[in-house]
């Protein structure tokens, strides 16, 4: 039995669809008491009372105990997720009308995964860096959940195979043992207000800008179209969604998804690592292909920066705690082996240009 908290309380505001014109005029208070009740059942009772779906994944089977009253729907989802050691997220649907049979959590995750991938394709390189730059610099270990903190979602504190909390031997290592689709979907820097200035843009462009500025995903029903013009400054997300929905002749509604991370099997972990290695090789080859397209001066400056990066890595290894140091050393070894292998495939003139980098990596490997 898992307690949601000493006392967990919830107030929800119905903001779904065109009915959101009424906004918070009528606040719906939810009073729920759960005593060792399946989290799916508690979520269903909240959904019934506030008419906002909280979908729970099939593998989330914990029981929870607590009282729900006088909290927002976000707080409800957060407390329910914490009590069941699950991740959770809020997203939005844009559709002509809600489906007669509500989507399952798995169906919603599939739709959101597709929407996120399409949104990513529409971003420029600079926009991707603005969204994900901090995560790429800091890496997923030891603080990835904090990087994804914000309104509308949170990642579970997962357990490693020996029962210790994430971070006991490093968050990155634990993440490799887990399948958490909600963690993969959450975008960093989420905000419940938005500033948008759109002049006669397509529905696709409007939703791209909405997600870029709010970091909340929107699933748009296929076939919807419209021309959107709006100007908002630090306005509630509902204002932007309402204007977009009206222009598209559609309705919008929030949805919530809650799910426990699933423990991967050894075979799944091995397969995932193979896939990562294939992606690493592809990125490595592409980076060096781009490198040789630059001018000699640009290449020399790039090598200097890479050498400096290797030296900074040496300092990180030296100052890292033992468990993280071991992972960094393995990472360095893979990078060095990949570079040595690559150097055998290029011309002697090209190897000469790379010599400072290879020497710096060799020194670091020896230490």
Image: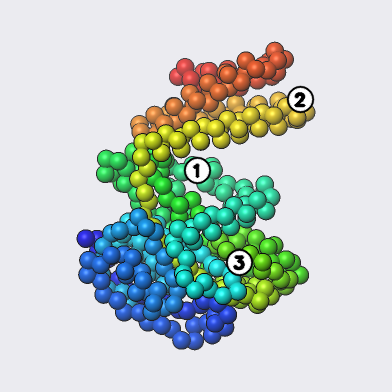
Left or right of 81 on screen, residue 317: right
Badge 1, how many Cα within 10 Å: few under 14, some, many 20+? few
The residue to which callout 1 is attached is 138
Q: Is residue 349 left or right of residue 150?
A: right
Question: Looking at the image, do the residues carrying marks 2 and 1 touch, with CB atoms under 8 Å apart?
Answer: no
Q: CB under 8 Å between callouts 3 and 2?
A: no
Mark 2 crowd level (few <14, some 14–19, many ≥20, 10 Å Cα): few
SS assignment at label 3: loop
Residue at x 30%, y 76% (from the top left corner): 32
Label 2 SS: helix
Q: Where does the image place residue 335, in percent across and percent down from the top left?
A: 53, 26
Q: Of helix, strand and loop, which one carries label 1? A: helix
The quarter of the picture where the N terminus appears is: bottom left
Decide which of tag 2 and tag 1 comes sooner along the chain. 1
Q: Position of residue 272 (x, y in %)?
A: 46, 37
Q: Residue at (35%, 79%) from the top-left corner?
A: 30
Residue 356 percent across, percent down from the top left: 62, 19
Q: Residue at x 53, y 18 (%)?
A: 362
Residue at image mark 2: 296
Q: Is residue 238 among what the camera can see? A: no
C-alpha span from label 3 to label 2: 50 Å
Q: Residue furthest top?
A: 348
Q: Is residue 2 above or below residue 169?
A: below
Q: Position of residue 162 (x, y in %)?
A: 27, 40
Cα separation between marks 2 and 1: 31 Å
Image quadrant where residue 302 sits: top right
Quadrant placement of the C terminus: top left
For image coordinates 25% across by 67% down, the residue present is 37
Q: Between residues 68 and 195, which one lies in front from this camera angle?
A: 68
Residue for badge 3: 221
- Viewer-side label of 1, 3: 3
Residue 306 visible in rendering? yes
């Amino acid at each position: 039995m898992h307690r949601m908290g000493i006392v967990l309380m919830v107030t929800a505001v119905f903001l779904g669809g065109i009915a959101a014109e009424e906004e918070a005029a009528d606040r719906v208070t939810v009073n729920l008491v759960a005593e060792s009740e399946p989290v799916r059942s508690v979520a269903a009772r909240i959904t019934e009372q506030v008419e906002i779906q909280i979908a729970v994944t099939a593998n989330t089977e914990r029981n929870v105990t607590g009282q729900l009253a006088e909290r927002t729907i976000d707080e409800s989802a957060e407390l329910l997720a914490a009590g069941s050691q699950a991740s959770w997220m809020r997203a939005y649907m844009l559709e002509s009308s809600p489906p007669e049979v509500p989507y399952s959590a798995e169906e919603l995750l599939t739709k959101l995964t597709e929407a996120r991938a399409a949104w990513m394709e529409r971003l420029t390189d600079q926009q991707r860096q603005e969204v994900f730059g901090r995560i790429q610099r800091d890496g997923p270990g030891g603080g990835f959940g904090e990087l994804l903190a914000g309104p509308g979602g949170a990642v579970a504190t997962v357990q490693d195979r020996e029962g210790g909390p994430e971070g006991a031997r490093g968050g990155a290592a634990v993440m490799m043992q887990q399948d958490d689709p909600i963690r993969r979907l959450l975008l960093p820097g989420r905000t419940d207000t938005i500033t948008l200035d759109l002049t006669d843009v397509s529905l696709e462009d409007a939703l791209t800008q909405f997600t870029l500025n709010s970091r909340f995903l929107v699933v748009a029903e296929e076939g919807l179209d419209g021309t959107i013009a709006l100007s908002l400054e630090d306005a509630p997300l509902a204002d932007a969604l309402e204007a977009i929905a009206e222009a598209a002749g559609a309705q919008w509604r929030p949805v919530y998804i809650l799910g426990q991370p699933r423990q991967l099997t050894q075979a799944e972990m091995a397969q995932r690592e193979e896939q990562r290695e294939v992606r690493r090789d592809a990125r490595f080859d592409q980076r060096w292909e781009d490198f040789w397209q630059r001018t000699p001066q640009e290449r020399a400056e790039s090598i200097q920066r890479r050498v400096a990066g290797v030296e900074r890595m040496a300092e990180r290894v030296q100052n890292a705690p033992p468990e993280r140091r071991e992972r960094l050393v393995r990472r360095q070894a893979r990078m060095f082996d990949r570079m040595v292998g690559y150097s055998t495939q290029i011309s002697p003139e090209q190897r000469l240009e790379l010599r400072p980098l290879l020497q710096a990596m060799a020194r670091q490997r020896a230490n």
